[in-house]
Amino acid sequence: MDEGSLSNVEAPRVSPPQAFRALEHAWRHLDYLYEISKLLAGFEGTERTFPEVMALTSQALLLRTALLLVGRDPGGEPHPDRPLLTVWHVREVTAAQLSLAAEQAASTYAWLVGVKEVEPQGEAVVGRKGPGGWFVPESPARASPTFITLPLVAKGRVFGTLQVEAAQVLVEEGLAFLDAVASQLAVALDRHHALRREVHLRERAEALERVQWELLQRERQAHLEAETAHRRQAFMAEAGAVLAASLDYRASLPGIARLLVPSWADCCVIDLLQSGPSGTERIAMMAVEPTGSPPGSESFVARLLASHPWVASPASAEGLPEGHVPVERAEWEGLPSNVRLLIQVRGRTLGTLSLIAAQPGRYGPADIALFEVLAQRIATAVDTAQLFQQAQEAVRWREEMLAVVSHDIKTPLLVVRLNAEMLLRAARPPDEERRHRGRRHLESILLATGQMRDLIAGLLDRARLQGMPMPLAPQPWTVDELFRQALEVLQPLVLEKSQELKVEVCPGLPRVRADRERILQVLSNLVGNAIKFTAKGGTISLRARQVDGSVRISVKDNGPGISSEDLPHLFERFWRASSVSERGTGLGLSIVKSIVDAHGGTLWAESQVGAGSTFFFTLPVAGP
């Protein structure tokens, strides 16, 4: 049998003193085994406990080296071809001796475990040359010095070896001591590996449980996101249906507010900016008390109406953020979630959509994106409704124009036809009376022709203004020159009614920048109206003076005056006071206002019933 085997050791014959010493050695070995068992009971890993065990063993037996090969991985799973090598040695052992011991230990381990190639692992591996494992023969070679190899057995199977190199010849007691140490080490290692397997399995189970939990959480999150996305899509579909149901945004926008409250907000306010003096119009407002409000606390709706900056006072162009930020977030005490979005289309800001919630952090990025799309759809709906209203107004204006033309042009045409017939009848040899009647007929024809010309010119001007800005050719003109040209045409009318026309121009008045033909049209209309509505022998004043960098022109008469109820409607299209007996199209003052506005001026009127009327308009001063 191989050297180092327990069967090769012959039990010596001993005398009584020797027996006493052997018994003493046995007790010492038991003490060391007790200490070793205590170390192995608190086994803390091969790298730490094995050197301590071998240090105690070396105190009982003089050892030079001890090599432990364990065919288990750190998780306790079998890996016989890649055993973990742990080395203990005294200081005098050289590297060459350690290399020889390692090769012998690997060879013996492979033979006992039943593998043909081993690749030891761990920092204790020494003497390795080149990659790969050690290829071992069928049985380990005899080596010198003598190594003692003890198998580590658990559950009837060898899972490792303990190879020791003694510094002296070992007797049976020493070999028994080593065998006991190996047995205890095998038990400790097997228990440690079982514990590591259990820990490893528990860790794997926990990791698998974490993975499953994460998958479940991701699935729940995906399901929640899908539900939220479906909810947003359903809301946008319903909002689109509400906006498309009517071209009257005053009817549809309150429906949008009802959709938003309370599903998306506790309060919704929609304000539209207006060009009139009011500046804004509150189209819709919806608010509810949030759920979960503590009893006895101040009403959420009451606090909104009393102090919320976006609710207590309607929005205005001046109150919007500088640069008109599309989305504005704000937080106030008791009102933590506030979002205001601009309703914009084609570069114009039409109004604001304000959403308020009592819950902090109510609106995330996805909600803001949804509200931005909603604000854009509201802007499109409002813009479409306004364009439709403009189109309806254009249709109404066309119908009114055709009605006026068909009604008012019949009388001048009748006058022309009758006078023409009279001229034909008067074409016989004329006498003085016929010549006189013929002259009157010609004057009537000319007057009717002028009426038709004025009517058609007014309609053309109004039609031109309806579709595009009035074209102007402004030039510097003195006010005296403009007055003189206008009065050349108007003076015969003044003389016919025996009226007095006063003209007053302040000295040193600067020139104005004006389109001559258009301003003459303004003067003719205003002075002509004053002549028309002033009784015979009345007085009309035409004045001009400089006021605040512009020239103010006024036309004053002492006619019947205009009532306070009629004054606001003077410059509206087709409007005529019911108390006026004179017939007309109602276009003259509307055209005058359009011409003055096109020059950058202002037109207004002041009047008192029974005390006459005064019409004012301004023109810009021409540059030097």
Image (cartoon, rainbow, N blue to C red):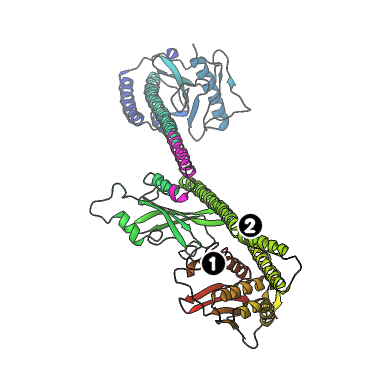
620 or 156, which is in the foreground?
620
Magenta residues span: 223-251
Residue 227 in percent (x, y) is at 43, 35
Q: Quadrant of residue 208?
A: top left
Tell me which numbered mark, 2 or 1, is placed earlier along the sequence: 2
Q: Please tell me whether residue 332 belongs to the stretch shown in magenta.
A: no
Distance from the alpha carbon under mark 2 to that under mark 1: 18 Å
Q: Is residue 84 above or below residue 479?
A: above
Q: Amino acid at mark 1?
A: Phe
Mark 1, secondary structure of its residue: loop
399 vs 560, left or right, is right
Q: Residue at x 64, y 65 (%)?
A: 451
Q: Which residue is mark 2?
A: 467
Q: Residue furthest top?
A: 1
Residue 417 in percent (x, y) is at 67, 60
177 vs 611, left or right, is left
